Image: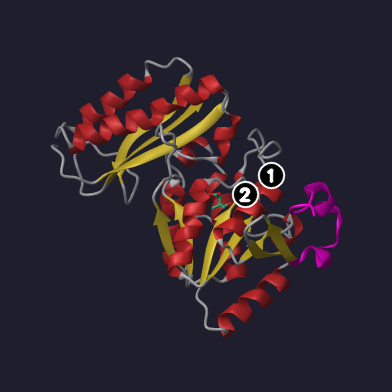
Amino acid sequence: MPLGFASARWNNVSSHRRSQWHTFIDQTEVSPLKTVQTIEELRAEIRSARSAGKKIGCVPTMGALHDGHISLVESARQETDFVVVTIFVNPTQFAPHEDLSKYPRPLEDDLRKCADAGVDLVFNPHADTVYPAKDAAYVEVPACSTMLEGAHRPSHFRGVATIVLKLFNMVMPDIAFFGQKDYQQQLLIRHMVDDLNVPVEIRTCPTVRESDGLAMSSRNMYLSDADRQTALALSQALKLAHDACCADGKALVEARQAMLDHLARFPDIKLDYVVIADANTLSEVEHAVPEMVALIAARVGTTRLIDNMLISAAVQT
Ligand code: PAF
């Protein structure tokens, strides 16, 4: 019996037939995973979970799942009773020159990982379901959309805010789980939820790293072996800044300089930004505030990577 199903065949069946139980079978265990593609089916599942008294957790993703996503699922399973993973490569958060068409879409593998992780439901909608009127309405969160990632990817956060609010309206979760890896994204979503009175709690879960420190990201699969080695400089630089502030009591300007000096040793790294910012506003800081975050965005070869590290210990000003 084949495991899962072929993605090409999947795209050709009707949405009615796509909603079904998938059983991923190996020698030792059987775990059922339900996938739905329409909002009606999704809401029916959520209604039935809620009427059984279950708390709903949601992990929004664009697929290409890795251990970082699975850690979000694990957090969701700890805090909620019915875990929904959404898999949707959201076109509106990609600029025309970005990697939408080549973004990895290993659906079969993703569903297997969801089944193994104990996800209850995967919502994997079509673009027409999510954007029936194309971009007739959208969400802007000016508070933290314009700096850092927003400055380098001008329409990105409008796309993120719009899709996340849409997903919240579709799934209606009690709690939604995001990774600290996309620091500005989680801050923006917190602002959106607060300012628009959206009844969902946001959890930010720690960045999951490879054993050598590289932050897990679906885009890591674009890195050549050499670029992957070079990419380690990002987490190394963040650690230098963290230790300069938290262990050595250095001033922020020196901590930032330590990052720049380290990154300058790698000619294949093209920096977009290297900052130490207030963790709540993302304004760059020169003097210490209680909660800070060091953030880097850079192109390694042709792959754009972001990473960050919280700096919360008392530092010299
Ligand atoms: O972080 C991501 O994977 C995406 O930006 C999100 C939150 C799923 C919205 O498309």
For the image shown, how many numbered marks are present on the structure?
2
* Separation of residues labelled 1 and 2 (CA atoms): 6 Å
Q: Is residue 291 above or below residue 50?
A: above
* Residue denoted by label 1: 105
Residue 113 as seen in the image, left or right of residue 9: left
**Judging from the image, what secondary structure is the residue with disc 1 in?**
loop
Q: Picture coordinates of residue 192 (x, y %)?
A: 46, 61
Query: Image check: 243 left or right of 9?
Result: left
Please identify the quadrant where the C terminus is shown.
Answer: top left
> As displayed, is residue 12 above or below residue 97?
below
Q: Mark 1 touching mark 2, by CB under 8 A?
A: yes
- Name the residue furthest front: 27
User: Can see residue 11?
Assistant: yes
Magenta stretch holds residue 18: yes
Residue 192 in sight: no
Dot 1 or dot 2: first in sequence order is 2
Q: Which residues are magenta?
A: 1-20
The label on residue 168 is: none
Q: Residues within 10 Å of mark 2 (few under 14, many from 20)?
A: many
Look at the picture and state if 150 lies above or below 59. Answer: above
Q: Position of residue 52 (x, y in %)?
A: 56, 84
Query: What is the quadrant of the N terminus in the image?
Result: bottom right
Relative height, residue 51 to residue 146 (above, below)? below
Quadrant housing residue 45: bottom right
Q: Amino acid at mark 1?
A: Arg
Indicate the quadrant where residue 232 lies.
Answer: top left
Residue positioned 71% across, 38% down in the render: 101
Q: Dot 1: few (<14), some (14–19), or many (≥20) neighbours within 10 Å?
A: some
- Residue 63 numbered tag: 2
Q: Secondary structure at mark 2?
A: loop
Residue closer to the observer: 212 or 148: 212
